[in-house]
Image (spheres, grey):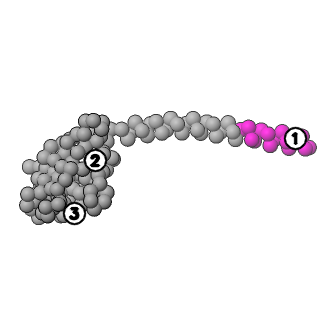
Amino acid sequence: MIKIALALCTLILISGCAHDSNTATSGASDSGTSAEQNAPHHQATDQWVGRWTGVEGLFLEVSKDEPAGPGHYRLHMRYGLDADQIGTFEGQATADGIRFNRGNGPQLLRAGDGEATGMKWLMEKEDCLIVRTGEGYCRD
């Protein structure tokens, strides 16, 4: 009886190890598939390259950061009326838009319309990029 119990335990352990190695193998291919699915984020954000206009002289200029590679951008912007509210920031494409850091912390530049900017002067616009409500830039 003890020999049968030991044999069953051995079989269970062996089958468990075989299952783990299959999981690891299938997990590796899943992560490769996931990486392939995440790679093209920059295809959408590449369409944002160019100049965008805000209100009262505010602007955003999106350009590709060629040395950094696909999905990397330089964001030159005047984002406020104070003299120090202008700068150039490095951004990277994500599924949600372009992530970048500014003096007031991490930011996300995302697509939207004039209504999403929350600014009455841009309400009628359809092609806009928004950092947050009250900070948006649109194209005519």
- The reply, left or right, for residue 107 in relation to residue 30 is left
As drawn, the residue found furthest toward the right would be: 1
- For badge 2, the amino acid type reads Gly
**Residue 57 versus residue 28 in the image, above or below:** below
- For badge 3, the amino acid type reads Thr
Identity of the residue drawn at 10% across and 59% down:
55
28 falls in the magenta region: no
Q: Quadrant of residue 47?
A: top left
Circle 3 or circle 2, nearest the eye: 2
Q: How far apart are the alpha carbons under marks 3 and 1?
A: 70 Å
Residue at which label 1 appears: 4
Identity of the residue drawn at 25% across and 43% down:
73
**Residue 136 versus residue 27 in the image, above or below:** below
**Residue 67 versus residue 110 in the image, above or below:** above
Residue at which label 2 appears: 91
Where residue 10 appears, as percent x and y from the top left, is 79, 39
Q: Quadrant of residue 115?
A: bottom left
